[in-house]
Amino acid sequence: MVNLSENTKRKPRVLFIAEAVTLAHVARMAVLAQGLEQDGFEVCFAADPRYNKLFPGLPADCREIWSIASADFTRALAQGRPVYSSAILERYVEDDLALIDSVRPDYIVGDFRLSLSVSARLRQVPYLSVSNFYWSPLANLACPIPEHPLVGLLGLSVAQFLFSLVRPVAFAHHAAPVNRVRKKFGLKPLGHNLNRAYTDSDMLLLADIPELAPGLELASNHRFIGPILWSPEQALPDWWETLEDSIPCVYITLGSSGRNDLLPAIINALQGLPVQLLVTTSGNPPPDIQASNVYYADFLPGDIATAKADLVICNGGSLSTYEALRCGVPVIGIAGNLDQHLNMRAVDALGAGVYMRNDQLDLLTLKHEVARKLAGQERTCEVASRLQAKLASVNPCRELTAAFNSV
């Protein structure tokens, strides 16, 4: 371990590795890497380059490392299959080892790069993993069924009952490739706990605030570092200057992993309200709905759009919800995958937003919730406003630096 005192001749060399199956994993690593490089650390950032064009300020030492295709990742989740085979993870380990040997880091920080549980240990480099609190092995949360054909066939109650019965077996199946690879490289298996397979590391960094996880007991190697927020450097559309300050804005952004096919129904349900709808289509063609209060863009800079909004409707992912809460704006999360469900259930339980399922979306309920939020008399508005002050003081880079001395 490298001493981080002021008398140290050099700051540590830190290798950041992002698993580029989603933009969020890359964004979190890029933000931390950029922040530490600005603080004088020697930094190397490694990821599949598919998202690199969105990060013009990446560290000078930027390497490529292969990740499976995002479409393959999404398809595996939708079909309930393990995301990674043993063969893929073995290739990941070999790629990791070659990179580690080249960079010779003092610390490794990873985001959903499951192979680092093996490769960092083989090279005896302290490994810090970034995740969310609901993936902690100590979270022990009730697990909602994600978007699945069973919900439409059997109804939510029956589908949830069956999912709860088979979940331990299914999660063990998902963890099995990790255990096989660990065994091959001489490490002990992690058991049948998928949360352990997803988060095993020397230090687990939780990209959340404790308020979202009341009652969660932390292990000695767990640490809250706060949400790691990022927005693309995106030019504002021409219509931005025509928005009326006196009319509330609803920012609708379902993201690349959300159900953008729901946009037409959502817009039709809300366009009659006295609001301005700021809608991102994630690069897809906009719905064939033209109204004077509906504004389309492929993408918007999330920080600016959220600051303009009185309400955010998103897919329930942690980046979008925390961006809204940082601006003191309540959020309606229309969740699909398990990560989104777990996050939005926590936001809803805290009273900072409303959790909805994308496969059970009731448009009348959505319209009613939007009207209530915009009236400003909902508890969600009060809670979101209170969390705004909390999030203003969060500094993930500072927390990461402090974590190095605890590994």
Image (tube, rainbow, N blue to C red):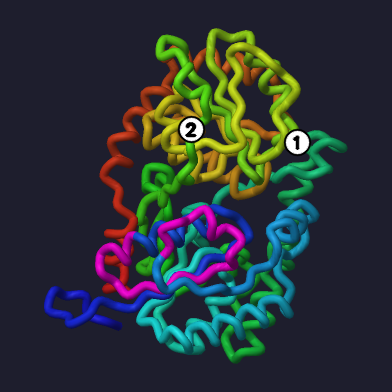
Q: Foreground residue, 362 or 29?
A: 29
Image quadrant for the N terminus? bottom left
Quarter of the image for residue 388 reads top left
Residue at 52 percent of width and 26 percent of height: 238
Tell which of 309 and 236 is nearer to you. 236
Query: Can residue 26 be seen?
Result: yes
Label 1, residues with CA under 10 Å away: few <14, some 14-19, many ≥20: few
In this view, the residue farthest toward the front is 238
- Is disc 1 placed on a helix, strand or loop? helix
Task: Give residue 236's mark.
Answer: 2
Q: In which quarter of the image is residue 336?
A: top right
Q: Residue at (41%, 62%) from the top-left corner?
A: 205
Find the magenta span and give its range: 35-58
Q: Which of 52 and 277 is in front in this view?
A: 52
Where is residue 370, by image quadrant?
top right
Q: Along the line of sight, which residue is nearer the eye, 186 or 305? A: 305
Relative vertical location of residue 302 with respect to residue 251 in this rendering, above or below: below
Q: Position of residue 402 (x, y in %)?
A: 26, 66
The residue type indicated by label 2 comes to Leu
Residue 263 is marked as none
User: Which of marks 2 and 1 precedes in the sequence?
Assistant: 1
Q: Disc 1, disc 2: CB below 8 Å?
A: no
At numbered mark 2, what does the secondary structure look like: helix, strand or loop? loop
Q: Is 113 drawn above or below residue 71 in the view shown?
A: below
Labelled disc at residue 157:
1
- Give the percent coordinates (x, y) of residue 176: 70, 73
**Is 60 covered by the magenta stretch?**
no
Kindly identify the residue that appears in the image at 29 percent across and 71 percent down. Answer: 41
